[in-house]
Structures are given as structure tokens and as C-alpha cells.
Image (tube, rainbow, N blue to C red):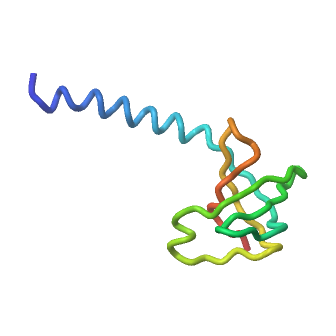
Amino acid sequence: MNQNDNKNPDKKVVEETQQSRGNQIVKKEGRVTEALPNAFFRITLEDGKEIMGFLSGKMRMNRITILTGDKVLVEMSPYDDAKGRIVYRLK
């Protein structure tokens, strides 16, 4: 067996784990109700639930501003439904 053959199975296992983790992310739309310090926001989701959201790194890097009243797309973990990551500002 080559050295490359030994590395490939491990790499495939890692990629499958990341894919399965990525499929568990829940995306929901909501509206920002309050701007908090350190790029945190209070968001009311369409189903009426209120969560704490924070800006994703790409949005911070590109200096996309979020104001009270903006409609946003939030990624949430199925394990913690009280927090979410703001990934997109809707128009």
C-alpha cells in the first residue's frame, strides 16, 4: 500500500462527518428587534420565538451593518434553540 492510500480513508471520514454536521443546521428568517453590544442582536423569528443572534465572521469582515427592523437569515443548531448566527441580511 502507498502512503497516499493510508491517508485517503481518514480524509473521507472527516469530510463525511462535516457534511453530516452541516445538514443539521436549521435556517430560519427573523426580524432584528434590538441591537446589543459586541455585534449581538435580539431577533424575533417568524414563528414568534425570540432568540439571541450574533454576526457571522464574513459579515463582520465585509462590514455589513444590521439595524433594528432588518430582516435576517439565521442559522441555528438543533441542540441550542436560544442562539443563532446571522448569515444574511434580507432585503
Residue 8 is left or right of residue 32, and the answer is left
Q: Is residue 30 above or below residue 18?
A: below
Which residue is outermost to the front? 37
Quadrant of the rendered structure where residue 33 is? bottom right
Q: Is residue 24 above or below residue 75?
A: above
How many marks on residues?
Answer: 0
Q: Is residue 50 above or below residue 38?
A: above
- Give the image location of residue 79, x and y in percent: 68, 35
Give the residue at x 69% y 56%. 74
Quadrant of the rendered structure where residue 5 is? top left
Which residue is outermost to the left? 2
Q: Quadrant of the C terminus?
A: bottom right
Residue 26 is left or right of residue 60, and the answer is right
Give the residue at x 82% y 68%. 34
Which residue is outermost to the top? 1
Give the residue at x 75% y 76%. 67
- Give the image location of residue 65, x and y in percent: 66, 77
- Give the image location of residue 11, x and y in percent: 30, 34
Residue 26 is left or right of residue 8, and the answer is right
Residue 6 is left or right of residue 17, and the answer is left
Q: Quadrant of the N terminus?
A: top left
- Give the image location of residue 64, x and y in percent: 61, 76
Closer to the camera in the image, 43 or 5: 43
Closer to the camera in the image, 42 or 9: 42
